Amino acid sequence: MRLSALLALAAAACASPHATEPGVEPRPVVETPAFGANGTVLEVPAVVRAGAVFTIRYAVFGSSSCLKHRVPETSAGPDFFLILPRLQPVGPNTPCTDDLATVTNTITASWPTPIAELRIVVRGYRFDGTVVDVVRRIRVE
């Protein structure tokens, strides 16, 4: 049953192995039955210095040849930094495979002032299409 779920995810990640219509931006899947949201979906340091640049690494699951990262949308509030992954649509007549891969992206960020708990949030989709937030908490000194 687990294998069938993974195969279904691979098929969902790339609607057609050979796209023939103009591409539609794929939904970034950040949680799957096999990996959940606790694996290596979101990696951040536990502590950073105020004003210093730090690295955020996040993953999207799907076809290795269909998924190409675009610059994510980001926003911030008083105690959070939100990342909305963006994926490049597959072009017409572009071959791609239905394999299951973890496609990672790295961005850099900084936080201007100390805060006891800054939430780093990646918002994407579960395997079943529902919206999910993957959250990590860091301290800014």
Image (spheres, rainbow, N blue to C red):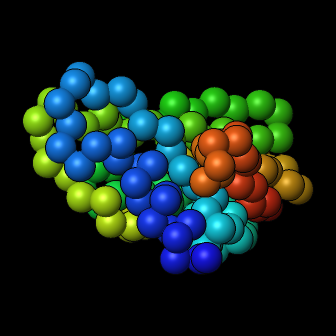
Residue most extreme to the top: 22
User: Picture coordinates of residue 82 (x, y %)?
Assistant: 66, 39
The residue sitting at 78% across, 50% down in the picture is 119
| Rendered position, 58 above or below 87 | below
The residue sitting at 14% across, 48% down in the picture is 95
User: Picture coordinates of residue 79 (x, y %)?
Assistant: 82, 41
For residue 98, side relative to residue 115 (left or right): left
The residue sitting at 69% across, 64% down in the picture is 37
Rendered-image quadrant of the C terminus = bottom right
For residue 1, side relative to residue 105 (left or right): right
For residue 13, side relative to residue 77 (left or right): left
The answer, for residue 57, to whether it is visible in the render is no
Q: Nearer the viewer, residue 116 or 123?
A: 123
The residue sitting at 45% across, 66% down in the picture is 7
| Rendered position, 96 above or below 45 | above
Q: Nearer the viewer, residue 54 or 120?
A: 120
User: Picture coordinates of residue 43 (x, y %)?
Assistant: 59, 67
- Total numbered circles: 0
The answer, for residue 136, to whether it is visible in the render is yes
For residue 141, side relative to residue 17 (left or right): right
Rendered-image quadrant of the N terminus = bottom right
Q: Nearer the viewer, residue 11 or 28?
A: 11
